[in-house]
Image: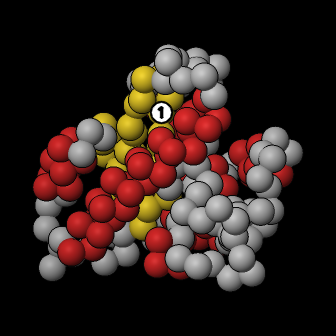
Amino acid sequence: MRTEVQPILDKAKNLGLSAYMLDASDIDVENRVRLKCAYGCKAYGKRLSCPPHIISIDEFRKMLSEYSSAILLIEEHDTSCEKDIFKAWSGLRKGSFHKMLELEHMAFRHGFVYAQLLRPGSCNECDICGENCNKPDIRRFPPEAVGINLSKIMEKNSIDMEYCNFDRVKCIGILLLE
């Protein structure tokens, strides 16, 4: 039996994450978002948690329609002292992912049996993906990979999203709940 979502929100806060409740129907899914994966990401096709190795945007739209709510999860990091922001991003998103995954597991234990996390950034649990995923139990795809327009979600929730501010980096995930 499903319980209230408040303990999950409280745990998010304790983990240092900002958490915002969303109606799943308010999550904008657009085909154009995935263009940034195919034409802009140097890791395109190299990670099994990213396109073209994951479900299609249309398949995700169908699945998303079966969810009623979600939690937008954000961990903001001060990166003003980082010399290599891309190297820092790799470690930061991994740490944020593990906190968010803890919330997915908690949600499941609290009765949200279809809880599913969309992770911040591409998976970087292993240095290189093999032919098959070495850690399928924690394999999750990022929101952008299935067409979620994070900019619109952030705007709807009055949250600043600065793409070119390398002094502050936000790791963003979405926890789907049902």
Give the answer, above or below, for where 150 lies relative to 119: above
Q: How is the image coloured?
A: secondary structure
According to the image, label 1 marks what residue?
170
Dot 1 amino acid type: Lys
Give the answer, above or below, for where 129 lies relative to 87: below
On-image quarter of the C terminus: bottom left
Please report the residue visible at 18 percent of the width from the left and 71 percent of the height from the top. 110
Q: Quadrant of residue 50?
A: bottom right
Label 1 Cα crowd, 10 Å radius (few <14 / some 14-19 / many 20+)? many
- Of the pair 93 and 3, the residue shown nearer to us: 93
Q: Is residue 35 visible?
A: no
Please report the residue visible at 81 percent of the width from the left and 41 percent of the height from the top. 40
Q: Position of residue 80 (x, y in %)?
A: 50, 17
- Of the pair 130 and 22, the residue shown nearer to us: 130
Give the residue at the far bottom of this rendering.
132
Is residue 76 left or right of 33 when viewed as pictured? left
Please report the residue visible at 81 percent of the width from the left and 47 percent of the height from the top. 42
On-image quarter of the N terminus: bottom left
Give the residue at the far right of this rendering.
39
Give the answer, above or below, for where 81 lies relative to 22: above
Q: Quadrant of residue 176?
A: bottom left
Q: Position of residue 128 (x, y in %)?
A: 70, 65
Please report the residue visible at 43 percent of the width from the left and 23 percent of the height from the top. 78
Q: Quadrant of residue 109?
A: bottom left
Is residue 155 left or right of 134 when viewed as pictured? left
Q: Position of residue 170 (x, y in %)?
A: 48, 33
